[in-house]
Image (spheres, rainbow, N blue to C red):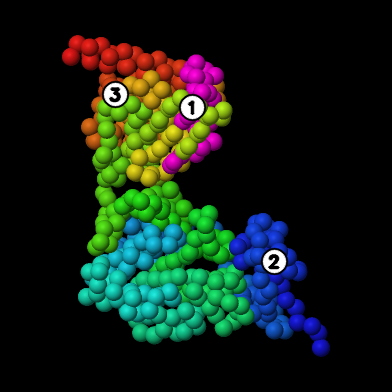
């Protein structure tokens, strides 16, 4: 009798090894390789003969197309992130840190849809029915017709979903707790996660029900399990936030039916998550206009303009190597801005500690914040505040030039709506509305920024002397 074959699979990245090893060759993690039976799970079977394939009909790219029908929740921030609501027959993966509010948001969405007459099924694999009911009572969702189950077996869940009328939305919390009889491995392993997700996606495509899957994240912030899960689903949403702040951000990473890099902002309270329709007011709510080293950055998140305060503190150092601390921005990009300021603008920061912070715990990822960061650094070094009614944006190159960024008009419109009357932006910016250049300072290079800030500081000093 032939010896049964086994394979060794990394539980972190899914790399298959021929033998056990302490360190995975794919991701470099230690003690993540587990022995699994390849005869169970997806794409395998004991001695099955492959059936003969049948030809499928081919068509052309031209033809009639229909817009994907959506299920709108009524929660505008959630509908914005998903592109207008959950698409019927789609699978959405939601990830986030423990306790960040994933289950709270989905319970509120389920209750909102149930009040609109939709059939919603909430399957919890981590909590008992009584625990989910307690959360629903706290959120004011206990009086809705959300159907609840506490189950982890994939076959039992599919049999339950197949009974009665087709559900409009199914929430699985979470995919790491699912296990199937067809896979001979423990729950949470790569094989079990892949098997469970494929079964749920198959049900969604066949029935037209929208499927929301909750995923755990690793210590690096990535969704745990095989990376192929993010490729299998139609949309990937990350729920971000700092427990030290009361706001949460739902960010789109992938969306086959809508825009990516879209965000929805929520505020955490004892009654659940509250929508924040104007996040710029949230991030600028406690701003001190007279403090040096503070610049307002006009940024973009997807199609939404967001104004946020960039804070810098430059202080003389007593250490041999100056300290560089960054919160909410890329530390490597800060080093580049410091080098450009010193090489092309004559701003000496080599003997100073530099601390950079984005107010409110917000994180900036676009390079358009370069000009705002440079302005905050120069302001802190000179110990003089910047004009309180001005916003800054623009990308800085290694030569010291300021490059234009996209969606200039939307940034300026948001700044004007919040009462900012001037802006410092690249001189070659496109999409600038005509007739609105009165309060704008257009710069071609970072030296122009330093000269402009120095001139504003001299005017401010003269005004204070006259007073």
Picture quarter containing residue 358?
top left
Alpha carbon separation for disc pair 1 and 2:
51 Å
Mark 3 crowdedness (10 Å alpha carbons): few <14, some 14-19, many ≥20? some
Of callouts 3 and 2, which one flags the residue occurring earlier in the amino acid sequence?
A: 2
Estimate the x, y position of residue 104 in percent, counting from the top left: 33, 65
Which residue is depicted at the point 43% across and 48% down?
Answer: 261
Q: Quadrant of the C terminus?
A: top left
Estimate the x, y position of residue 101 in percent, counting from the top left: 36, 61
- Residue 387's tag is 3
Picture quarter containing residue 79?
bottom left
Picture quarter containing residue 65?
bottom left
Residue lying farthest to the left in this orientation: 467
Taking depth in this image into account, of 179 and 210 the one nearest to the observer is 179
Which residue is depicted at the point 38% across and 25% down?
Answer: 380
Q: Is residue 125 above or below residue 398?
A: below
Residue lying farthest to the bottom in this orientation: 1
Is residue 231 toward the left or the right of residue 135 in the image? right
Q: Quadrant of the N terminus?
A: bottom right
Magenta segment, which residues? 327-354
Indicate yes or no whether the magenta region holds residue 333.
yes
Taking depth in this image into account, of 162 and 130 the one nearest to the observer is 130
Residue lying farthest to the front in this orientation: 318
Label 1 belongs to which residue? Answer: 317
Which residue is depicted at the point 43% across and 27% down?
Answer: 314
Indicate yes or no whether the magenta region holds residue 102.
no
Is residue 244 toward the left or the right of residue 10 in the image? left
- Residue 16's tag is 2
């Amino acid at each position: 009798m032939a010896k049964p074959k086994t394979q060794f699979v990394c539980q972190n990245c899914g790399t298959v090894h021929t033998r056990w090893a302490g360190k995975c060759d794919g991701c470099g993690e230690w003690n993540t390789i587990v022995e699994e039976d390849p005869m169970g799970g997806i794409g395998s079977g004991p001695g099955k003969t492959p059936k003969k394939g049948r030809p499928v009909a081919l068509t052309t790219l031209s033809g009639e197309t229909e817009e994907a029908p959506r299920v709108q929740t009524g929660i505008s921030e959630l509908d914005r992130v998903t592109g207008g609501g959950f698409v019927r027959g789609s699978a959405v993966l939601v990830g986030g840190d423990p306790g960040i509010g994933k289950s709270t948001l989905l319970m509120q969405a389920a209750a909102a849809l149930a009040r609109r007459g939709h059939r919603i099924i909430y399957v919890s694999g981590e909590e008992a029915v009584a625990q989910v009911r307690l959360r629903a009572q706290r959120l004011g969702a206990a009086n809705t017709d959300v159907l609840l189950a506490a189950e982890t077996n994939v076959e039992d869940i599919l049999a339950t979903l197949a009974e009665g009328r087709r559900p409009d939305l199914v929430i699985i919390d979470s995919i790491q707790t699912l296990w199937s009889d067809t896979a001979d491995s423990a729950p949470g392993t790569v094989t079990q996660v892949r098997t469970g997700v494929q079964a749920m996606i198959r049900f969604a495509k066949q029935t037209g029900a929208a499927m929301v899957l909750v995923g755990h994240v690793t210590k690096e912030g990535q969704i745990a399990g095989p990376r192929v899960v993010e490729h299998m689903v139609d949309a990937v949403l990350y729920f971000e936030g700092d427990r030290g702040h009361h706001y949460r951000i739902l960010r789109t990473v992938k969306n086959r039916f809508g825009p990516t890099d879209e965000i929805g902002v929520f505020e955490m309270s004892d009654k659940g998550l509250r929508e924040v329709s104007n996040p710029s007011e949230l991030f600028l709510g406690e701003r001190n206009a007279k403090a040096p080293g503070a610049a307002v950055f006009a940024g973009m998140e997807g199609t939404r303009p967001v104004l946020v305060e960039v804070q810098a503190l430059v202080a003389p150092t007593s250490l041999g190597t100056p300290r560089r601390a960054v919160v909410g921005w890329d530390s490597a990009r800060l080093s580049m801005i410091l080098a450009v300021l010193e090489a092309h603008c004559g701003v000496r920061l080599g003997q100073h500690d530099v601390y950079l912070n984005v107010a409110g715990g917000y994180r900036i990822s676009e390079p358009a914040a370069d000009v705002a960061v440079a302005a905050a650094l120069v302001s802190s070094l000179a110990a003089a505040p910047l004009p309180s009614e001005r916003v800054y944006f623009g990308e800085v190159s290694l030569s010291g030039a300021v490059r234009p960024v996209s969606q200039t008009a939307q940034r300026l419109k948001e700044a004007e709506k919040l009462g900012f009357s001037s802006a410092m932006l690249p001189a070659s910016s496109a999409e600038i509305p005509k007739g609105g250049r009165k309060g704008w300072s257009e710069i071609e290079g970072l030296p122009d920024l330093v000269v402009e800030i120095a001139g504003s500081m001299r005017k401010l000093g003269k005004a204070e002397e006259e007073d």
